Every structure is written in C-alpha cells, then in structure tokens.
Image (spheres, rainbow, N blue to C red):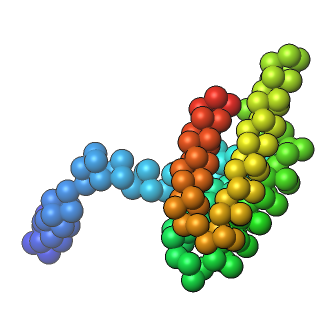
Amino acid sequence: MPYIQRIAINHVSLKLKRMKITPSFLFLITALTILPTMTAIGAEKDSPAAIQMKQIGKSFKTLSTQISDPAKKDSSLQIVDAIQNAVNAARPLIPAPAAKLQGDSLKTYMREYAKGLDELDANLQDLKKAISSGDTSASQGLLETITKLKKTYHSDLR
C-alpha cells in the first residue's frame, strides 16, 4: 500500500475515532427527526366546548392577577363580561368526554355540566357586583369560590 494511501486512511480513521457516534447520539438524532411528525399526527383538534373553556381559563387567570388593583376596575369588569360570554357560548356545546356517552349517562353528564355553568354564571354576577362596588376582599373571596367550583366540576366531569 503506498504511503499516501496509508496516511489518508489513518487520517479518516482518526476523525471517526474523535466523532464517537454512540447509541445515545443516534437515538437523539432519530428522536429529533421523528418527533415533529409524530406530534402532528397525534394532535387532536380541540372541541368547541374546550375552546370556550380555554378562553374562560385564560381570562380568569388574567382577572386573578389584576383583581386587587382598583385602577384596573374597568378592565376587570370587561374580563368578567368576556368570561360570561364564553360561559353562555359553552352552554349548548357538548364537551369531548360527553361525546363518548349515551343514554342516561349522557343526560346525567349534561345536567351536571349545565349545573356547573349555572353556578359559575351566578358567581360571576356576584363577582361583577363586588368589583363594581370596589370591594376587593369580596372579589378575592369570590375568585377563590370560583376556583373551588372549577376543581369540583373538573374532577366530577372527567
């Protein structure tokens, strides 16, 4: 074997030794190339009810951060109105878990769903009155009540 060929082969083998392609590196590269396609395949489109619930959640989070600031009273009232609109829009919609039910279990689920929305709406009306009157402690108490209501119905209706 000529000298130049031996040098070239040695040079290539040295480079390969320095790169060290390990099984974990191969797994990482494979995962990074396959993962984006898998998330697109497995992604489900949100139901109309889920979209309204997400809107309620976002608005509620914003409201929670600003409720104690009297300077943001008008903004807080607008957020409560937006939540009430989303609640009213969600009333006739069927949540995704209910789509799998039939007969009496579907009727029971939908009654419980409507009851939860009614309770939320009543608390939102009280919250609106408390914000309008400038009663910060009552507003914060109602936010806690709404949070408990959310936890109760979300655990019951899953």
What residue is rendered at 15% in x and 70% in y? 11
Q: Is residue 136 above or below residue 42?
A: below
- Residue 124 vs residue 13, the one in the foreground: 124
Residue 73: image location, x then y, percent: 63, 77
In the current view of this chain or complex, which residue is farthest to the top? 104
What residue is rendered at 21% in x and 62% in y? 19
Left or right: residue 1 versus residue 73 is left
Residue 4: image location, x then y, percent: 14, 75
- Residue 85 vs residue 158, the one in the foreground: 85
Residue 55: image location, x then y, percent: 70, 60
Q: Is residue 58 above or below residue 107?
A: below
Residue 51: image location, x then y, percent: 74, 54
- Residue 64 vs residue 57, the one in the foreground: 64
What residue is rendered at 77% in x and 66% in y? 81
The answer to whether residue 37 is visible is no
What residue is rendered at 24% in x and 50% in y? 22
